[in-house]
Image: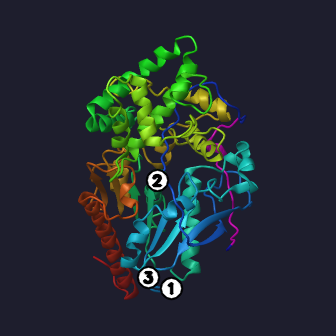
Amino acid sequence: MDILTYPFRQFLSMLLLIFSLHVSAIQLKMIPRLGALRKHSRGELLQSSINSESAASKDFPESYTTFKQRYVINFKYWSGPNTSAPIFAFFGAEENIDDDIDGIGFLIDNASRFKALLVYIEHRYYGKSIPFGSSKEALRNASSLGYFNSAQAIADYAAIIMHAKKKYSANNSPVIVIGGSYGGMLASWFRLKYPHVALGALASSAPILYFDDIAPQNGYYSIVTKDFKETSESCYNTIRKSWAEIEEVASKPNGLSILSKKFKTCTPLKRTFELKDYLDSIYSEAAQYNDPPNYPVTIVCGGIDGAPKGTDILSRIFAGVVAYMGNNSCYDMDEFYDPTREESIAWRWQTCSELVMPIGHDRNTMFPPAPFDLKNYIKECKSLFGVLPQPHWVKTYYGGHDLKLILHRFASNIIFSNGLRDPYSGGGVLEKISDSIVALSTVNGSHCLDIQREKPSDPQWLVMQRKSEVDIIQGWISNYYTDLLQLKDGTSST
């Protein structure tokens, strides 16, 4: 374990904080999770950790407190020190980095070809990279949460990458940063903010346009609806009709008890919101991670459509739940968002402070109308954390309506990859911006599918998408080696 001492600074001026944590009575749908993977597994690689640097203006309050931040190194494919072989750095996001090491296959699958050193970096405040000694202390109040934002996360990544290059005598090694979902946003922002550290970035399923009013608010749920409707019209219609049926049953004497029994909830329902939010999460997750060869949307609709003829609407819906979640003794309505889970609290903090994504749905979707309401969102976040959300901060710090122009003029070497069946593709970069800011999309692709492990069952369009990504990265690296050689020879490139 390596320990470096870096300043640990805080963005207090960015946020207005009056902190008090308690459960809110306001019922708002949480922003759908941005995890790169739906299910996780662990790999066995060398693990080490350092104390990481945090980025901040000199005008901000400073301290020199440090904390241990984990990164994972895989040397297996690396050609060794002083060879200028590339470094592939994966940016962890809102989860334990152990969950990504095995599931994110892009690095492993291509390491041998590039003789690359692989680095996986855990995001601060997640996994074991927790400041202040424990999650309880780290998530306690304004003084600790003020250190928790994306700008400081990418500064951590810069510090760790530079440390690794020095430690392993890889100063001339080009760095390609890779991230999926929120991590994909971080990768693209990193290339924009730290072009001297990373040669290029692969940003998979990164909805960097889903902020403020750049992308349509109902974009996410419109794609979920489209996925289900294209899979099965009857399934789509059953889901669309089910919301009113839930309310009708709930209005009867002991209606909530009837619903609890029908859906085998682990605890009695207190509000219909709990059940509707649970079903919303199932449909959203199935669409977001609608990966081949199993295709979860098909599984859900198979349960709904496969119920015996004459089965009532809600029993069909429950059959879809069983098909997707398994035949369990009961179903936990907090399965997708447990407000007491530290990871959930941490992600809610991020979406309540800077990552305000205005996601809602209207009558054109298969969901009941629930438009994004910023006033209620602010009220909810103030109730939870005492924080005033900053809905314009991402545009201010990373670029707003003119982001494509900014990327065209000031950035280079970024791949934005998207699957168009992924609901988050509605906030993704889907058009080529310049010769080196490339958008790759697949009609049938899902969330972060391109950076998952290669499988024999992968369809040809997925194989070709990955090949295009690798070829582009190879071009970046080849140009880098040409420039490096010319600089060593005292010549300049033309």
Magenta segment boundaries in residue numbering: 3-18
Disc 2 to disc 3, how far (Cα)? 31 Å
| Marks 1 and 3, how far apart at CA | 8 Å
> In the rendered structure, which amino acid carries the disc numbered 1?
Pro
Q: Position of residue 301 (x, y in %)?
A: 34, 37
- How crowded is the residue under tag 3: few (<14 C-alpha within 10 Å), some, or many (20+)? some
Quarter of the image where the C terminus is located: bottom left
User: Residue 169 location in percent, x, y?
Assistant: 54, 83
298 to 94, vertically: above or below: above
Left/right placement of residue 451 relative to residue 393 reads: left
Q: Answer whether residue 11 is magenta in the image.
A: yes
The image quadrant that residue 77 belongs to is bottom left
Residue under label 3, please give it.
84
Q: Answer whether labels 2 and 1 touch (C-beta < 8 Å).
A: no
In space, the residues marked 2 and 1 are separated at their CA atoms by 32 Å
In the rendered image, which residue does mark 1 sit on? 81
Q: Quadrant of residue 165?
A: bottom right
Q: Main secondary structure of the magenta part?
A: loop
Which amino acid type corresponds to the residue marked 2 in the rendered image? Leu
Q: Which mark is residue 37?
A: 2
Residue 65 visible in this rendered orientation of the protein: yes
Q: Is residue 360 visible?
A: no
